[in-house]
Amino acid sequence: MNDIPKAYDPGAVEEKWYKTWEERGYFVADPSSPKPAYSIVIPPPNVTGVLHMGHVLNNTIQDILARKARMQGYEVLWLPGTDHAGIATQAVVEKNLRKQGLMKHREDLGRDKFLEHVWAWKEKHGHIIVQQLKRLGCSCDWSRLRFTMDSDYSRCVQKVFVALFRDGLIYRGLRMVHWDPAAQTALSDEEVEWIEEKGHLWYIRYPLLDPEGRTLPDQCIIVATTRPETMLGDEAVAVHPQDHRYRHLLGRRVLLPLRNKPIPIVGDAAVEPEFGTGCVKVTPAHDPADYEIALRHQLPFTVVIGPDGRMTPEAGHGFAGLDRMEARKAVVAHLEKLGLLEKTEDYIHRVGYSQRSHVPIEPRLSEQWFLRYPEVERAQRVVENGQIRFHPEKWVKTYTHWLSNLKDWCISRQLWWGHRIPVWTRTFEDLAELEAARATFPLSDLDTAIRCQDRTMVVATANPVLQQQLTRDGWHQDPDVLDTWFSSWLWPFATMGWTGQAERDHQNPTLRRFYPTTDLVTGPDIIFFWVARMIMAGLRFMDEVPFRNVYFTGIIRDKHGRKMSKSLGNSPDPLDLIRRYGADALRFGTMRSAPLGQDVLFDEKDVELGRNFCNKLWNACRFRQLQQGQAAIALDPDRLTVDDRWILLKLNTAIQEIHAAFTEYRFNEVTQTLYRFFWTEYCDWYLEAAKAVLQARDVYQKASTLGVIDFVLDHTLRLFHPFLPHITEELWHGMGFTKRYPEDRGGCSLMFAPWPEPFAADFLQRYQLHEGVLRFAEARYALATEGRNLRRLANLPANRKVKFILRPAQPLNDYDRQVLTLLLQAETLELDPEAAPRRGTPTCRTLLGDLYLPLEGVVDVAAETVRLSQELTKIEVEIERLQQRLSDSEFQAKAPPHVLQEHERRLHEWRQKAAHLRSALELLQT
RNA sequence: GCGCGCUUAGCUCAGCGGUAGAGCAUCAGUAUCACACACUGGGGGUCGCAGGUUCAAAUCCUGCAGCGCGCACCA
């Protein structure tokens, strides 16, 4: 017991307890438990990723919620898992294989071989993030670890696809999509980041042709463009049909420079006459707006930029093969040489970048699969009417705005790593043959949906037998995979074993108990990608919201407010922080600096503070352990000192504040309250005062105080446990608190000890815990501070024992005197109602009386005179202000009585202080 | 352009109608027997600007400015 080390060393303690909890199955959720249910599903991290600060913030919050719920007596399911992260993972593996020289392009290996490599990569790296979450202390039910590419999960994805396909919400079509030339795949609208950039507006002359197709000297139409390289694919020039500058040219043609191709001038209302020259070059295959114009005017689609971002042969000699950015320079150079570049203006515009590969996206015309979102209105309603609550609430607006401006979701990706689209097609010789084939499909198979167009039959199926058969029979399976989010949006129920068969799902104990989940904790950056879509999927397939509350964290930034990124090198490795400071320290520091709804400016200092705090907690318990003597088991009202009552009241206040903060998900406030209570109120004041009893000989009194200490520490450890799970568990056992609780409620582990509740009224009454106690205790603490200041002013070192004299303004008993002596670090404190100071005696006035440091001549008279005069001036200003206030008849008439009283009390206090200062000054002068 | 948020001590933020607060940083002192990852004391703010409401405004209202973030097909 007395060999507890002076400094807390988290390393061994943390690993030991995590292992114990896991081995004893404490994290496992039992659906058959009689307790009420509490559940969270983890936002699945990338399976091959590593832990970053965002994960730390996010998962610490989830762990706090889960651990608190367990203590509150809930059966807790925190369901963990990982995400296959299509583009990111495939890109990493491709890069790796290329580095190893195993391939140049994935086609070199072929689909099956390539996927073997990805799976091998997943097997190799997949456990890393899980291990890291464990190291952080996350109390997930690991027996239920899920992966979005698990076979069960894949079946869910396929079933959902088939169901939506059957309902006509999923369709395939030729569309202009956002194309990522680096990953070479289509993206959804949400995956494009619009970044404002400095660019140019190039004004290009397109020579006008006469009706016979001959060039007309000096007659040109000038178009303005930010992307001159696309002109190689122009098929028209458009003007507003009502624009009288150009109306007469409608129907005429211009000669497309560099390609020497005649193209028409068309009238289209989409053209804004005010912008540029009022003439738009129309590139149907490379611009969404131009695509629409082209459809309206039946223009051809000439593709001049290939899927890899290089110019195609269609771009013509001299350009074909160039990268689009090189082509831009080349086109401008050529135009300049030909004298067709009218002018170049600087221009700030927004360029779409792929969120994944950070290259400019390229609008591209291609066949893709789309989803018309289901349950949109209901999804909007459940958030607006509070069935799902957002914290902070401000995100509701963002959410509903997005939902009311939805476009269909492009769900196909030209990748190999992911859920392959479960669609097989076959084109038959004639309709009769098609009908014959169609008749062979059982209509009762809910996992299969069929659509026919002409002689082509499209079969979407999640039925594995049928899938194999179709492949065997030579049907063609769609080569694309689904957007990763198309699997993530099913996460809350697919992870719980959803099958889509109502009866089976109804029997599923996990779904029954734990769906809908209670809380979701995630970043606002994926409100559209994930949160909104989960709500839609939940409503569609479970007919119930997926969660009751969504807590949106802030984004973790560095201490300068910059986003954390690998290239900036400002992203600390959480595992390194854990090694150096401990997981508890990291958790506490992160939570303490993370206010609700605001970005978190992370500083390693926060973690240091967390470590220091753990050390403080450790030593406070160590101090208790080092005390000899027996502690009272129950608190004895007759033996409680004023300090005991004070700390009990402060504890109650802290519990109340913590409850209030938790109901609003204000985790940083909880940590701040805990910090203040434990460090300032308990350690700095209460423990120091309690030493008066602990150092005395009265064993009964000492037992009582030790009882209070144990009572407070017991509560403190429980309150801290969700934030600092490891150290609190260690101390819970070390202090022997397990003996105070039943086996399943704290006797074996702090994890299941009861969550502290504010004290009941009869408790407060029995121990006489009321306002008056606070006043008196705090007056004594204020006196201590004043006295320490006196000592400081007299330049007396803190360790020099000195005598203080107090002329008491109210009776003080011997216990109070002893406490004050201790708090003042005094040799003695003499209570003398007649005390009259000699000249040059440092003195101050407190609520409890005038305090003297009877050491003449130790004060620097000049300096002290200045200081006191300045203070007097300040006080006189305060008095003046208060007097003015109080003499105002309107204030007298309208201010509530307690405010009036408070002002009068304050005025009295200030006047007392002023009077004392004046006499102190006088004492110095003479 | 529309919407949202922020602006309080050197830094990060609390406070949201009745004497301006915390942590860190800073300055001074301390090896006191829980803790130097500590203790003690101090200094530091006309609460972005301008109006208004009120007996009383950092706090409520209006306008302005600066910063940040969403959303929007003006090439």
Image: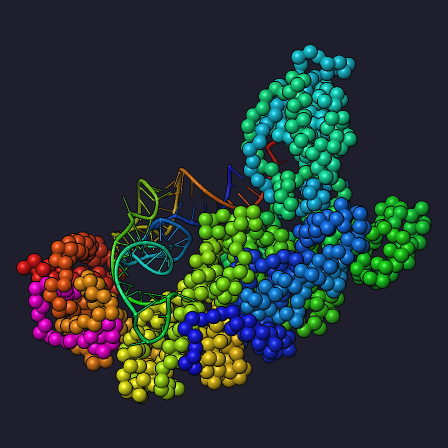
Q: In this view, does A13 lie to the left or right of A891?
A: right
Residue A312 sits in which quadrant? top right
Name the colouring of the figure: rainbow
Q: Nearer the viewer, residue A446 or A906?
A: A906
Q: Is residue A32 left or right of residue A685?
A: right
Q: Which residue lies furthest to the left in this view?
A: A926
Q: Which percent across, then down, holds residue A131?
A: 61, 65
The answer to whether residue A162 is visible is no
Image quadrant in which the C terminus of chain A is located: bottom left
Residue B24 sits in which quadrant? bottom left
Q: Is residue A72 above or below residue A426?
A: below
Q: Which percent across, then down, holds residue A321?
A: 74, 32
Q: Is residue A833 magenta?
A: yes
Q: In this view, does A905 lie above or below B69?
A: below
Q: In this view, does B24 lie to the left or right of A473?
A: left
Q: In this view, does A810 lie above or below A742?
A: above
- Identified at 55% across, 53% down, the residue is A524
Q: Is residue A394 above or below residue A495?
A: above
Image quadrant in which the N terminus of chain A is located: bottom left
